[in-house]
Amino acid sequence: MELTVQLGDRSYPVFLNDSRSLPDVLKSRFPDRGFALVTNTTLARLYEKKLAGLDRALGPVRHVIDDGERFKTVATWQAVLDTLLCSRLDRQAVVLAFGGGVVGDIAGFAASAFLRGVDYVQIPTTLLAMVDSSVGGKTGVDHLTGKNRIGAFCQPRMVWIDTRFLDTLPEREFVGGCAEVFKYGFIGGAEMFAFVVAGREKILGRDPALLLDAIEKSIRIKAAIVAEDERESSGKRSLLNFGHTFAHALETYYDYDKLLHGEAVLWGMACAVELGLRAGTVPAESRAEYAAFCDHLPRIQLPSRPSAGDLYAGMFADKKAAAGKIRFVLPAQPGTSVLRDDMAKADVLAAIEAVLDRTSP
Ligand SMILES: NC(=O)c1ccc[n+]([C@@H]2O[C@H](COP(=O)([O-])OP(=O)(O)OC[C@H]3O[C@@H](n4cnc5c(N)ncnc54)[C@H](O)[C@@H]3O)[C@@H](O)[C@H]2O)c1
């Protein structure tokens, strides 16, 4: 199946479970080009055979990074650039990002900077990367002052999704990826909301047909949002941050340790619904529907009980807090969300406390 991210002359295809072989497609779309492949230690080990096939077909320069968010740094990015710069590659190079969101973000950012920018291809291997980070062109690395604070908008030339990669994905990572699928239920329209409500159990159970459907629907929603607001300037793309304002505060609180991003997003989405119910953005007739939906989302157990005040303070440090105001994405009619920066501190704290009551020891 082929989907398209419509961005004029920078439009690109997203191939989903395509029957052709990846090297054949790469060779035909990028004839006579040099390749580099960026991956991490875990994937290099798990997919040794597959990567050997790519080696034989394309002879890419390879750079393997350490595995983990803590390596999503300027130093790692620079090491990728060192490899590219010390190779035979020129401006015709195509960088292949083979991995989850961390590899994709770093490799994309390296491609954006190498010789002032070369093409790159996303080959996502986690559910999160398939439905979210591989599409949309946000690339970058973390800084001591926060996540993803250094980077560039740089769209890939192509995205290649093969859901067989999910067979080796650990369960926690898979559930974390489901968080981003469920997120689209809150922002992707009434049909997506209904799909996620009805299909949630089967998606979590890795039902192949439902999962494929969920990935396709998620990409279509993300692609449409990116096409409308590529650089997050009109507010439309900010809707993708549903649950993320709370999630980032929680991740920062735990120093990006102990919780996966997707787990923090599940927790953050519960907070967003709680706040939406309190602030009245959810219409009265939909309150029960939202409450039931949240009840059935996987429940994250936190290792401790953070103070709601600390988490609230942490939200101001988030790069999305413009001019000292925290912008929340809150649920409205099922399947739609609204941006609000006028939430009373007391309501935010109460929403956080309510979710902490359900999720902390
Ligand atoms: N660019 C964007 O628009 C965007 C959007 C959302 C998230 N992100 C970023 O994505 C990152 C999170 O991505 P992620 O959840 O994919 O994390 P990740 O890249 O760290 O991958 C998670 C873990 O799964 C392993 N893994 C990956 N694929 C595997 C497979 N097929 N089999 C077995 N193990 C596998 C990885 O080695 C890693 O240990 C964060 O840095 C976040 O900031 C970026």
Image (cartoon, rainbow, N blue to C red):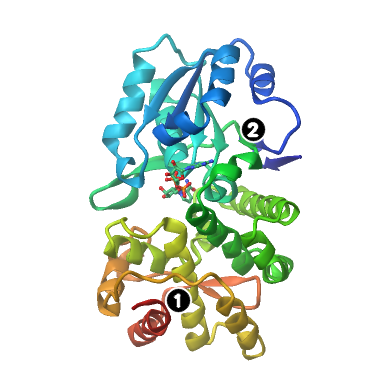
The residue at which mark 2 appears reads as: 9
Q: Position of residue 169 (x, y in %)?
A: 53, 46
Quarter holding the N terminus? top right
Residue 125 in percent (x, y) is at: 55, 40
Q: Which mark is residue 32?
A: none
Outermost residue toward the bottom in this view = 284
Figure label count? 2
Residue ID at (58%, 25%)? 50
Q: Tell me if label 1 and label 2 are in contact, CB under 8 Å.
A: no
Local packing at callout 2 (Cα closer than 10 Å; few below 14, some 14-19, many 20+) is few
User: Who's the residue at 53% across and 87% down the image?
Assistant: 280
Please provide percent x and percent y for residue 251: 34, 61
Q: Which residue is mark 1?
A: 271
Which structural element holds mark 1? helix
Vertical side of 170 occupied by 83: above or below: above
From the viewer's side, name the closer residue of 44 and 271: 44
Q: Nearer the viewer, residue 98 or 7?
A: 98
Q: CA distance from mark 1 to mark 2?
A: 39 Å
Q: Element at badge 2?
A: helix
On the question of residue 44 being in view, the answer is: yes
Task: Name the side, left or right, on which 236 lies relative to 31.
Answer: left
Q: Amino acid at mark 2?
A: Asp
Q: Does 126 appear above or below 28?
A: below
